[in-house]
Every structure is written in C-alpha cells, then in structure tokens.
Image (spheres, rainbow, N blue to C red):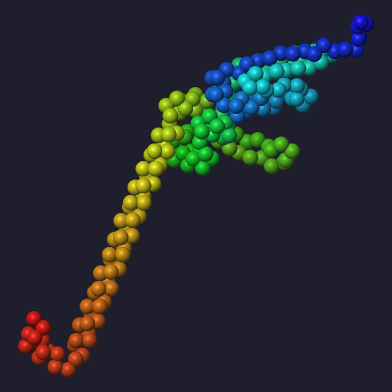
C-alpha cells in the first residue's frame, strides 16, 4: 500500500488530575480545564479535552511547535491545580451545598472567602465579580463534615427564633387582653357613677 505523504500523524499527550486537585468533583475538574483553556492561545483552546479526570491534548504533527507550547502550559497548570482557587460552582458541588446556603454562610463568616475574582462572560461585555475559596480550607470543611454541622446549627437557630416569636406574640396578646379588660372595667365604673342613687346602693352593701 503506497504511503500517503500528506497524512499527518496526530500528536497526543495526556495528564491525569489527582483527587487532591479535583476534590472529587467533576465540576472542579471542568473548572481546571477552563483555567487551562484561558491560558492557551485561541487556536489551541479546543485541542485539549477532558474525559473524567484525564486531560488530553491532540494536534496534527504539522503543529509541533504549538503542541509543545500548549503542553508546557497544561503541564504547569496541572502542577498548580491543587492550589487553584475554588469558584462558587465548584465549592457548591464539592461540599454539596445550595447557592442560598453559600451566600448565608459566606455572610456570617462560617465560609471564609479567599478574595474575589472578576471575569467577563463569554461573548459579552459584562463582567462579574465573585468570591473564591482556598482549596485547603474547602478540603478541611469537606473532611470534617462542616456543612452538616452548619445545617444543624441553622435548624436549631430557626427553631429558637420561632419559639421567641411565639412567646412574643403570646405576650402581645396578653397585654392587649389586659388593656381591653381595663377598658371594660373603666366603662363599668363610669356607667355606675352616672346611675341615680348608686352611692347609697353601694353603701348599703347590697353588692357585697
């Protein structure tokens, strides 16, 4: 079979993301891929793909120089992956929390921020700023089951708040009832004072 001189042998290289880098999250793994793509030139972005926890770079043999440059970027990013900041979507997936929980725990200080990051949305001029988190802190929260502890704390605080609200409502109703009772008593006294012969009637002790 004659050799096809126009045939380009594909250049391939793979990297495996460690559990310490992904924190067991497919969303985190995708975030690392996006970080890699952001560091690559436009012509190389689509040459790297993610399958599970494995990154694969593939290019035509004629793109050897670009392949080497992209390989260097990917290798460096994979090496740094374990220390890359964790974004909101990633931390929600890693810790299994809701967006509302993330906002609440961030606001009350239980979820410490590692700073903010500003990015431009794809295809848009608008920029958004969001909090990012230290991967070491996120891993510690995961290992000690902090999210479940916080949910128990929140449930207890909510129950206590309901108890206080119920007590306050009962107290308010009691005060209103006392006021109404006093008004009725004052009304009876006023009525009695206008009755002819009431004083004599009262002195005779007929109501005692």
Say if 208 sits above or below 130 in the image: below
| Left or right: 146, with 208 as reference point | right
| Left or right: 207, with 151 as reference point | left
* In-front residue for pair 65/187: 187
Q: Residue at x 74, y 13 (%)?
A: 12
Residue farthest toward the left in the current orientation of the protein? 204
Image quadrant occupied by the N terminus: top right
- Is residue 132 at least partly visible in the picture? no
Image quadrant occupied by the C terminus: bottom left
Say if 117 sits above or below 53 in the image: below
| Left or right: 202, with 139 as reference point | left
Quadrant in which residue 13 is drawn: top right
Residue 194: x and y, percent? 21, 90
* In-front residue for pair 69/148: 148
Residue 67: x and y, percent? 76, 15
Residue 148: x and y, percent? 43, 34
Say if 143 sits above or below 125 in the image: above
Q: Residue at x 72, y 17 (%)?
A: 57
- Is residue 34 at least partly visible in the picture? yes
Residue farthest toward the right in the current orientation of the protein? 2
Residue farthest toward the front in the current orientation of the protein? 1
Residue farthest toward the bottom in the current orientation of the protein? 196
Quadrant in which residue 88 is drawn: top right
Quadrant in which residue 80 is drawn: top right
Q: Residue at x 36, y 47 (%)?
A: 159
Q: Residue at x 19, y 86 (%)?
A: 192
Say if 197 sits above or below 19 in the image: below
């Amino acid at each position: 079979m004659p050799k096809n001189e126009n045939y380009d042998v594909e250049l391939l290289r793979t990297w495996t993301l460690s559990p310490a880098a992904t924190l067991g999250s497919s969303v985190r793994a995708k975030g690392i891929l996006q970080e890699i793509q952001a560091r690559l030139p436009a012509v190389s972005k689509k040459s790297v793909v993610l399958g599970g926890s494995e990154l694969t770079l593939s290019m035509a043999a004629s793109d050897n120089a670009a392949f080497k440059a992209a390989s260097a970027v990917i290798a460096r990013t994979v090496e740094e992956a374990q220390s890359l900041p964790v974004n909101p979507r990633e931390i929600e997936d890693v810790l299994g929390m809701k967006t509302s929980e993330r906002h609440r725990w961030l606001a009350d200080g239980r979820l410490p921020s590692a700073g903010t990051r500003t990015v431009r949305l794809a295809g848009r001029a608008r920029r958004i700023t969001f909090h990012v988190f230290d991967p070491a802190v996120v891993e510690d929260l995961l290992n000690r089951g902090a999210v479940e502890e916080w949910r128990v704390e929140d449930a207890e605080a909510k129950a206590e708040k309901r108890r206080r609200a119920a007590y306050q409502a009962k107290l308010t109703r009691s005060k209103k009832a006392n006021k109404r009772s006093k008004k009725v008593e004052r009304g009876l006294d006023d009525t009695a004072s206008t009755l002819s012969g009431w004083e004599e009637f009262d002195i005779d002790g007929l109501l005692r």
